[in-house]
Image (tube, rainbow, N blue to C red):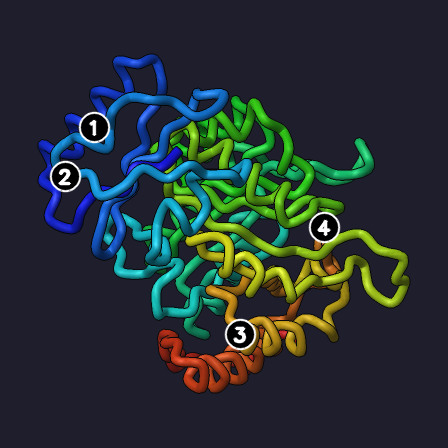
């Protein structure tokens, strides 16, 4: 159920409604919108009669038939815009967000070399893996807390917002400590205990679509996070498993407008994992901007041929510069803004 408050409802009105819901043994989720506040009710197995319609400030009570409540546009008519402390970068607003960096943090030197270039190109978010869930137990698993400390240094040096993956409750606590946004990877999209823990975190969450997940399953996974009280959630399309053999995964760009019709949450596109091939990343990035995505997540490495993970899909820094130039032009056409690139030398960069 959703309680829609009137535009002129006071904070006291909203608090009174939440208090009545909580006293009945349910959970209240107040979600402010541009013109109104909606209060989601969770914990109920069906319709509940609490007499909320008669309370001060209440416009209407809606019975929600969808299995997801808080992520739906019924709960919030305006788009969610995720903001970060001490930084004016956003996800979900008019600014097109670009998240870039290596698949894995391999060393301080490697991470700083990549961060310098992606920041100079205009990216405002840095991605890097500290914990890497790999298909083989013998593959590089990440540097753990050491990598998180390196990324915290990168934030301080370049002003980039750090997004990195948590793979279990223990690593999530460390990611919450050092990072700015917690990534839940495709393999963990339906790790419900981890989703609940992310929902209790104080940092925003980037939720990646599972390799065989439907749109409804993705939205329900986001609902798990939001039902615990964390409403700063962004989704990420990173390709699904199909019969195609010309690409690592099949990047489903049609999910972008589908999400935006059903949900107020922002959605990013990851063409690196979505294709698995370097030569496809820039063309699919162009398409992602054109289709209305709120941002990109791109892998960049200073020496991808020697990368410890996902080298074949990682762009060289010069290629990322070119991607940003093209994406910036398309972003302007669709009414998005992007940070201008800084002046830097590419004389010693890889080609």
Q: Residues within 10 Å of mark 1 (few under 14, many from 20)?
A: many
- Residue at figure coordinates x 60%, y 32% from the top left: 167
Q: Secondary structure at mark 1?
A: helix
323 on left or right of 181? right
- Residue at figure coordinates x 16%, y 29% from the top left: 15
Q: Secondary structure at mark 4?
A: loop
**Which numbered disc, 3 or 2, marks the residue that appears first in the sequence?**
2
Q: Which residue is mark 2?
A: 57
Frontmost of labels 3 and 2 is: 2
**Which numbered disc, 3 or 4, marks the residue that appears first in the sequence?**
3
Looking at the image, is 84 positioned above or below residue 296?
Answer: above
**Can residue 154 be seen from the camera position used here?**
yes
161 on left or right of 235? left
Choose between 252 and 179: the one closer to the eye.
Answer: 252
Q: Which residue is mark 4?
A: 309
- Whether tag 3 and tag 4 are in contact, CB under 8 A, the answer is no
């Amino acid at each position: 159920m959703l309680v829609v408050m009137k535009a002129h409802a006071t904070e006291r009105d909203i608090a009174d409604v939440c208090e009545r819901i909580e006293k009945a043994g349910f959970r209240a989720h107040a979600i402010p919108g541009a013109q109104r506040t909606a209060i989601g009710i969770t914990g109920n197995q069906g319709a509940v009669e609490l007499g909320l319609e008669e309370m001060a400030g209440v416009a209407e009570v809606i019975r929600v038939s969808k299995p997801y409540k808080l992520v739906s546009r019924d709960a919030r008519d305006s788009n969610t815009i995720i903001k970060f402390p001490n930084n004016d970068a956003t996800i979900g607003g008019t600014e097109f967000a670009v998240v870039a960096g290596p698949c894995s943090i391999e060393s301080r030197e490697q991470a700083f070399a990549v961060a310098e270039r992606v920041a100079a190109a205009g990216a405002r978010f840095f991605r890097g893996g500290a914990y890497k869930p790999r298909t083989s137990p013998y593959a590089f698993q990440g540097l753990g807390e050491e990598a998180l400390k390196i990324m915290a240094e990168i934030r301080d040096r370049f002003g980039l917002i750090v997004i990195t993956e948590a793979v279990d409750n223990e690593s999530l606590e460390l990611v919450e400590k050092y990072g700015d946004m917690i990534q839940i990877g495709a393999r963990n999209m339906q790790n419900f205990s981890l989703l609940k823990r992310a929902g209790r975190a104080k940092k925003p969450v980037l939720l990646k679509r599972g390799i065989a997940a439907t749109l409804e399953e993705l939205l329900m996974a986001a609902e798990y996070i939001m039902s615990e009280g964390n409403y700063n959630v962004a989704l990420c399309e990173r390709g699904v498993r199909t019969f195609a053999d010309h690409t690592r995964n099949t990047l489903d760009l049609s999910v972008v407008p589908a999400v935006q019709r059903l949900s107020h949450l922002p959605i990013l596109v990851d063409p690196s994992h979505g294709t698995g091939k370097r030569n496809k990343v820039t063309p699919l990035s162009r398409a992602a901007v054109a289709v209305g995505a709120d941002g990109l997540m791109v892998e960049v490495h200073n020496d991808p041929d020697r990368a410890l993970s996902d080298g074949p899909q990682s762009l060289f820094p010069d290629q990322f510069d070119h991607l940003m130039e093209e994406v910036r032009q398309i972003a302007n056409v669709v009414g998005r803004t992007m940070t201008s690139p800084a002046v830097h030398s590419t004389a010693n960069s890889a080609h």
